[in-house]
């Protein structure tokens, strides 16, 4: 497992760029100028006071030039102020402001520091220094300066906002959110503060809140490009890619040079299935910024979606060459390498999943297992990702048991009873926060996320050991289900599942029931039972009214809430026909014959060009070609289903 990334200067290029864009404010310019002239900073004769008055007039002229965009003229004037009255703080501050506007951040910071040395009690000078340090990626100095401004003026919304953007650049989202909350507390009409608060909420896993806050920002300022950008990101997280696209297009309309918008448009189009438009936006992104890792990765994602795997790999490698800590570059490489059964490279890149938050291994004093001999050792194995992956990776557990390991397995709480019954040799605990007492009180030699076991036991295809039935359902619930289903008719009982609830993958996996007619026609005497989790009533009503097909939706089963019930229900059918979702992992683990329909570019764990599964003996894969629609796939499945039923007759 890779160690946590060091906080080095270039580790957060994307975050820093985002933070600087989020600041969305000019440096403080004219606050305190007159106060400097009369604040006692320049004691002396009446002639000195008269000279200050003259300098004030020069300063006013310089500010007018600055506000008119005549930066070189303004800079010349403010330099003259510094030469004429070197003890005045405002001359240095304003010189720094112009340097900052010209992108000359080093000289800007130098002048702000000189201003602070002459007037340490002016919060604006420290605020401006924070902006300059942020632009130079000097995050600790930027934070110190922002805190200094806040110490002098606790109700300084712009300084709180800047402190929040610094925390964003450090990926300290909780502290960022707190700072942004302060910014809007002290100025409820501060649109930029609301925008950035929404961004922090999204990073903390609350895209719904992110949408709420971005909309508040847009109510205050309908032309705030950053708010549309953040709004798009939240919609993407929720799988609402069309909404994301419309907001990104509006962002670009307002700010054509907001280059990250093109990179994100590439991603949103790719996830929506419009791969050609994704490719187009990805190419525009790279034209505008050839070295933006996000743009490179997202163009790779578009090519990946078109099954141009080698071209995608080359882009992902280019991204990690520019930014060796590019977590999404490494993560996407893992998916391609594993899909191509290049396991050595694939599992190595897969470890980056910890950093992307797709994988979790909670910090604890227990050392991380790195392939050491496990005989006689007590391993804490932590389930990861969704229920399907936890079932799939549990096929590794027998390898460890065979070598004499003692295992405590933390898994999704809904899955725990099924795993405990299926693997009586294990101690099973629900994966909770805070940890279950079994974990809190346990004494372990090593810990590992369950997917990391593959690095040591699945390095080539022949290492895989496809399992027959290894999950053991609740026998009582199974029999009750079987009795209900066989009472519905004399034919075979076929479980069907047609959609995924995972937003990121649903568009390329789901097959609406209107495409299922050949499958229904292949088994005219069968009883079709929904083994689909989630809301299905509208779909079932559609099948009844538009297709004349009855699908039994068992009122005694709550597949979404209870894995125990779902497993028992699946174990009670004769055959399962499904898309790629948690259902097929259950049916594969239960040894139920399963016809699984997967997209042209499926999730990596179905690999490429296989009809069999390396995980489960009972699964047969039906792949959609890149230029096919689902009707051709369901037609092939219908023939396979008819043959399977005929052979069982």
Image (cartoon, rainbow, N blue to C red):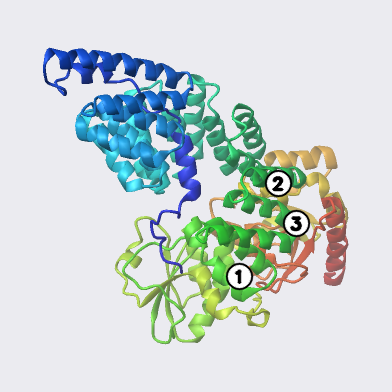
- In front: mark 1 or mark 2? 2
Q: Residues within 10 Å of mark 1 (few under 14, many from 20)?
A: many
Provide residue 559's location: percent of width, then percent of height. Answer: 59, 52
Q: CA distance from mark 1 to mark 2?
A: 27 Å
Q: Which residue is mark 1?
A: 346
Q: Residues within 10 Å of mark 2 (few under 14, many from 20)?
A: many
Can the viewer see residue 37 in this picture? yes
- In front: mark 2 or mark 3? 2
For this view, does 61 lie left or right of residue 566? left
Mark 1, secondary structure of its residue:
helix
Provide residue 533's location: percent of width, then percent of height. Answer: 62, 50
User: Which residue occupies 51% across, 39% down?
Assistant: 207
Q: Which residue is mark 3?
A: 599
Image disc number at residue 283: 2
Q: Residues within 10 Å of mark 3 (few under 14, many from 20)?
A: many
For this view, does 7 lie left or right of residue 319? left
For this view, does 413 lie left or right of residue 558? left
Mark 3, secondary structure of its residue:
loop
Can the viewer see residue 181 in this picture? no
Which one is earlier in the sequence, the residue at label 1 or at label 3? 1
Provide residue 131's location: percent of width, then percent of height. Answer: 37, 36
């Amino acid at each position: 497992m890779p160690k946590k990334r060091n906080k080095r200067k270039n580790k957060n290029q994307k975050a820093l760029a985002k933070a600087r864009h989020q600041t969305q404010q000019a440096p403080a310019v004219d606050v305190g100028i007159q106060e400097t002239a009369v604040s006692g900073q320049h004691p002396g004769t009446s002639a000195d006071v008269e000279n200050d008055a003259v300098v004030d007039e020069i300063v006013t002229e310089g500010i007018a030039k600055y506000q008119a965009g005549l930066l070189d003229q303004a800079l010349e004037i403010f330099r003259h102020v510094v030469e004429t009255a070197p003890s005045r703080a405002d001359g240095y501050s304003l010189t720094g402001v112009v340097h900052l506007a010209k992108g000359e951040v080093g000289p800007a910071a130098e002048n702000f520091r000189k201003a602070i040395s002459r007037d340490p009690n002016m919060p604006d000078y420290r605020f401006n220094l924070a902006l300059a340090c942020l632009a130079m990626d000097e995050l600790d100095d930027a934070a110190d300066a922002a805190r200094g401004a806040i110490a002098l003026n606790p109700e300084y919304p712009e300084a709180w906002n800047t402190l929040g953007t610094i925390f964003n650049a450090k990926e300290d989202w909780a502290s960022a959110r707190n700072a942004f909350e302060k910014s809007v507390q002290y100025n409820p009409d501060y649109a930029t503060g609301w925008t950035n608060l929404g961004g922090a909420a999204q990073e903390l896993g609350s895209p719904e809140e992110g949408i709420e806050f971005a909309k508040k920002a847009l109510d205050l300022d309908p032309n705030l490009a950053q708010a549309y950008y953040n709004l798009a990101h939240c919609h993407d997280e929720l799988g609402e890619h069309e909404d994301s696209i419309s907001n990104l297009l509006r962002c670009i309309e307002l700010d054509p040079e907001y280059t990250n918008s093109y990179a994100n448009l590439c991603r949103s189009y790719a996830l929506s299935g419009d791969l050609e438009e994704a490719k187009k936006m990805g190419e525009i992104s790279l034209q505008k910024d050839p070295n933006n890792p996000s743009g490179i990765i997202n163009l790779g994602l578009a090519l990946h979606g078109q099954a141009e795997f080698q071209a995608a790999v080359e882009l992902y490698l280019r991204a990690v060459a520019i930014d060796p800590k590019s977590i999404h570059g490494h993560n996407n490489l893992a998916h391609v390498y594993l899909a191509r059964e290049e396991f050595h490279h694939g599992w190595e890149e897969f470890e980056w999943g910890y950093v992307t938050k797709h994988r979790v291994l909670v910090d604890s004093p227990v050392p991380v297992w790195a392939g050491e001999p496990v005989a006689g050792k007590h391993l804490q194995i932590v389930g990861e990702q969704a229920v399907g992956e936890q079932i799939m990776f549990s096929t590794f557990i027998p390898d460890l048991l065979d070598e004499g390991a003692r295992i405590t397995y933390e898994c999704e709480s809904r899955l725990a009873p099924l795993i405990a019954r299926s693997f009586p040799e294990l101690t099973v605990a629900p994966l909770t926060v805070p940890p279950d007492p079994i974990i809190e009180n346990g004494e372990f030699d090593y810990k590992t996320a369950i997917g990391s076991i593959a690095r040591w036991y699945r390095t080539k295809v022949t290492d895989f050991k496809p399992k027959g039935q290894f999950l053991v359902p609740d026998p009582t619930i199974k029999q009750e289900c079987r009795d209900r289903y066989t009472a519905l008719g004399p034919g075979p009982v076929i479980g069907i599942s047609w959609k995924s609830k995972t937003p990121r993958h649903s568009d390329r996996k789901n097959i609406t029931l209107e495409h299922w007619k050949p499958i229904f026609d292949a088994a005219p005497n069968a009883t079709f039972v929904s083994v689909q989790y989630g809301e299905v009533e509208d779909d079932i009503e559609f099948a009844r009214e538009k297709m004349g097909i009855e699908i039994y939706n068992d009122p005694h089963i709550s597949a979404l809430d209870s894995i125990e019930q779902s497993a028992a229900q699946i174990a009670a059918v004769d055959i399962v026909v499904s898309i790629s979702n948690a259902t097929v992992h259950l049916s594969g683990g239960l040894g139920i014959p399963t016809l699984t329909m997967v997209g042209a570019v499926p999730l990596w764990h179905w690999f490429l060009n296989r009809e069999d599964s390396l995980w489960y003996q009972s699964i047969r894969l039906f792949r959609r070609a890149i230029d096919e629609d689902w009707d051709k796939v369901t037609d092939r499945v219908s023939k396979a289903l008819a043959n399977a039923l005929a052979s069982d007759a």
